[in-house]
Image: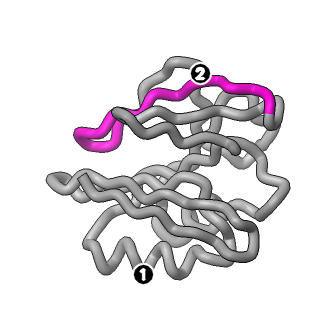
Amino acid sequence: MIFRQVFDNKSSTYTYLIASAKGREAVIIDPVIENVQSYIELLNELDLKLVKVIDTHIHADHVTGASKLKLATNCSTLMGEHTPADAVEIKVKDDEIIKIDQIEIRAMYTPGHTSDSYSFLMNNCCFSNS
């Protein structure tokens, strides 16, 4: 498995790139729009195909880069079913499994930070909204 954590200084938020080393399929969680070009460069450097972009919630601290990544890579955009966002292609339910090649990520509805907040669990890693 390939795992990269990217910190955005302006918003003080983390973005995560997770990929299967075997199939080279990747997911990006909580991308920041100003960093989309650097994500694309990282994907190219690692020879990865972006298949999904996940947002944990609608962000107040930054604008998501999901739509811009979709335009650049033809990936799918994904959020929890409680999101009011219209531009999201896939809306997952609580306890639903998201598969990226051999990687499984469990969606968990975790309202509190926002009413549409979801956390995503992969093995012993939890990607959350706070």
Given the image, on which type of amino acid does mark 1 rest?
Answer: Glu
Task: Label 2: state its secondary structure.
Answer: loop
Side (left or right) of 91 relative to 85:
left
- Which of 12/111 is in front? 12
What's the mark number on residue 56? Answer: none
Task: Please identify the dominant SS of the magenta region.
Answer: strand
Of mark 1 and mark 2, the one earlier in the sequence is 1
Graded by Cα atoms within 10 Å as few (under 14), some (14 to 19) or many (20 or more), the crowding at tag 1 reads: few
- What residue does disc 2 label? 93
Side (left or right) of 23 relative to 53:
left
Residue 92 position in % (x across, y down) = 57, 28
Task: Label 1: state its secondary structure.
Answer: helix
Residue 107 position in % (x across, y down) = 53, 28
Image quarter of residue 13:
bottom right
- What residue does disc 1 label? 41
Residue at the (39%, 76%) spot, across then down: 42
Could you tell me how many numbered marks the image carries? 2
Task: Identify whether 86 is placed above or below 14.
Answer: above
Q: Is residue 97 magenta?
A: no
Given the image, on which type of amino acid does mark 2 rest?
Answer: Lys
Q: CA distance from mark 1 to mark 2?
A: 32 Å
Residue at the (65%, 32%) spot, across then down: 118
Side (left or right) of 124 relative to 59:
left
Q: Which residues are magenta?
A: 98-112
Residue at the (43%, 59%) spot, across then down: 17
Residue 101 position in % (x across, y down) = 26, 43
CB under 8 Å between discs 1 and 2: no
Task: Identify whether 33 is placed above or below 108.
Answer: below
Image quarter of residue 90:
top right
